[in-house]
Structure formats: C-alpha cells, structure tokens
Amino acid sequence: MSPLRFDPAGARARGATYLAAFQAAGALPVEAAILQPAETLLDLYGEDIRARAYVTSDPIEGEMMLRPDFTVPVVQAHMAEGAEPARYCYLGEVFRKQESPGGLRLSEYLQAGYEVFDRENPLDADAEVFALFAKLLAPLGLRAATGDIGILRAAVQGLPTSAPRKAALLRHLWRPQRFRALLERFAGRAPLSPERAALLRRLAEGEPVQAGAPHLGLRGPEEIAARLRTLAEDAATPPVAAALVDELEAMLAIAAKSPQALEQLRAHVPAMPWIGASVDGFARRLDALAARGIDIDGLDFEASYGRTTLEYYDGFVFGFYAEARPDLPPVASGGRYDALTAVLGQGRAIPAVGGVIRPALVMALGEGG
C-alpha cells in the first residue's frame, strides 16, 4: 500500500467546506476549549480514559486533559443553556494517544462534526445525520457500516439474572473478549481460577478470609469485606441458561445487509422477547433512512459494530471506511448518545446523535491513497 500524504492546510480547507455544509443544514457553529476538566471525563469513562488522553495539571483548574473529542463539551453547553431542537457543528483538533506513534492513526487530528438534539423524532435524526455524511463522502466511494448498541443493551438488560451480573456485562460491553468471558462464566461454562475457587470455598464454609485477603491498591478492610460479600452473592446466583447465552452470542455474530440482518434479529425475538421493541426501532430507522435516499438493501449492519469506540454510544452507530485501506481508521464515524445527555444534564435528558469526519483522511484518500 502506498504511504498516505497528509496536508494540514488542505485538510483545514476541506474541513471548512464540511463546516459550511453543516451550517447549511441548520447547525450552529460552536467552539470548545482545548483543555477540558479531567474530572468530567474520568467520571464518564473511569481511569481507562487516561490510557487514551493527554493529561496535565493546572495550579488553579486542577487536572486537565487535551480535548479527546468535541461531543462531551458540546453536550455540556447544550444541557446548560441550549434550546430544543438544536443542531451544532464544529471544526478543530482532538488529541488521542496511539499505540504506534508516527503511524496511520494520528495523535492529533482535525475533526469536522455535526450534532443533533431532537426529542420529537430521534429515528429521523439518526437518518438525517447518516444521510448528510453519506452525501458529503459519496465522491470517495467508501463502505458504510452500521450497528445498534441499543439492541445489545436491551439484550443484556432483559437477561434473567442478578442486577450485579447485568451491570458487569453492560460495563464490559465495550470489551468483547471480557464480555464473552463473563457470559460464559455466568452460564457456568467457564472454569474458575484456582485462587477464586479456593476463596469461594472458604466463604461457603464460613471461614473468615478477610485477614488473609490480598490488599489491592488503596482498598481498606471495609471495601475488601464488601467485595467478599459480592463474590459470595454472585456464587449463589443461579447460572444463566446455556441456551439463552448461545442465543445472545449468535445474535452478536450477525453481520449482513440491513434487510437480512433485520430478519435475523427478528428470529431471536421469540427466545429474547425483551429485545422486540429495539428491533422494531431498527426497522423504523431503516424506513427513515430509505426515505432520505439511502439504499438500505446495500447497507451493511453488524450487531457488534461500535463496541470498541468511546463508551457513550447507546443506540445507532455508524462508520465510513476505505475498503482498499483496511489499515486506516474510519474516515467518518458517529452514533446516538442519549444516556450521555442524562449524565451531563444531571438527570435531564434529550435524545442526541452526531458524527465526525476526518478531513485529513479525506484529502489523503482523494489523492489516491
């Protein structure tokens, strides 16, 4: 594969054309500070965000991060004072640590973004954002991929098991290998480690184990005792039926054109009736996409798509890829993040969806990359 040539000035000029297109679609241009309070991002994502963000310390503001994305500050601004419905757009750099410095995934890159807040018809808002991106990127001949995190969340939330187990699965939805390992353990099909088995045996026999339990980090005796109680309660929880776990894993493996994917999803509803409403929502979204000129017969759907992106997506997700360059990140991506508005709005929520385009990749691919 030929090396890509990145042109910062050309990328900014191309980004400006996208910004103008977003404004023509009714979006208000917004700015966001490059330095963002780390506390907000840590509350949202936990300590995992440190592995991806550049962290610094300010003597007055405290711990700060170089802007890892625009969505969080845009949502904060809208929930504080925005009118509804609302559309916003932006153009600026974001900063993400990469495992291979100097490679094709840049640590600093330009984003052009479009965000829609609309409680009246969220499915049409999904279609609006996707169709606008598809139109702008059409000259590149990219492959579009879509998914729906909402169906996966519904599948987990309806499982006949304990609330702590469902919470653990939802927490690891973004880590597919860990998620599957938990599913197998909750079905009773994964062997326990010798250490965990020994600990659970001692708990079952009523033997005091707190004094001999390993201290992890800054955990105190009360935290260790609470953790031991949680382990004991989990050990007493009946396993999830193996057939139901197989059903969920088969659903996660769905990858087909959207109409066929819809049929396959509906085939899982009898075994998991709690996903029915989400699958019906997927069908209505396809209608909304078709109404905006999208060829849904040729649109790819992957049930597991979006599970390795930022963790605030909770519904429709999408990405646009250069098929001839599988080594590249998506040229554009986005999705729905309703739950994020509730967290940043202190309980007040509004359906929201958005996406970003990487102008530097557009320019490089347009030059034959």
Image: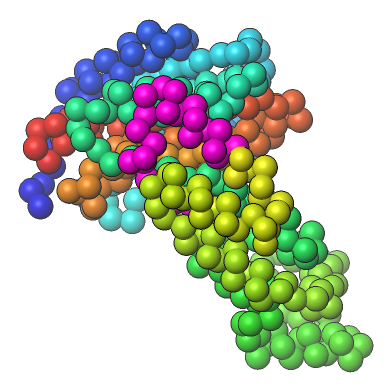
Along the line of sight, which residue is nearer the eye, 138 or 67? 138
Q: Is residue 220 visible?
A: no
The residue sitting at 67% across, 42% down in the picture is 277
Residue 87 screen position, x and y as percent: 51, 15
Q: Which stretch is magenta?
A: 281-303
Along the line of sight, which residue is nearer the eye, 107 or 285? 285
Along the line of sight, which residue is nearer the eye, 314 or 344? 314
Along the line of sight, which residue is nearer the eye, 93 or 27? 27
The residue sitting at 73% across, 61% down in the picture is 159
**257 lies above or below 156:** above
The residue sitting at 44% across, 29% down in the picture is 289
Residue 249 screen position, x and y as percent: 55, 66
Using residue 63 as the reference point, say whether residue 277 is left or right of it: right
**243 lies above or below 365:** below
From the image, give the main secondary structure of the stretch colored magenta: helix
Residue 77: in magenta span: no
Residue 294: in magenta span: yes
Q: How many marks are shown on the rendered structure?
A: 0
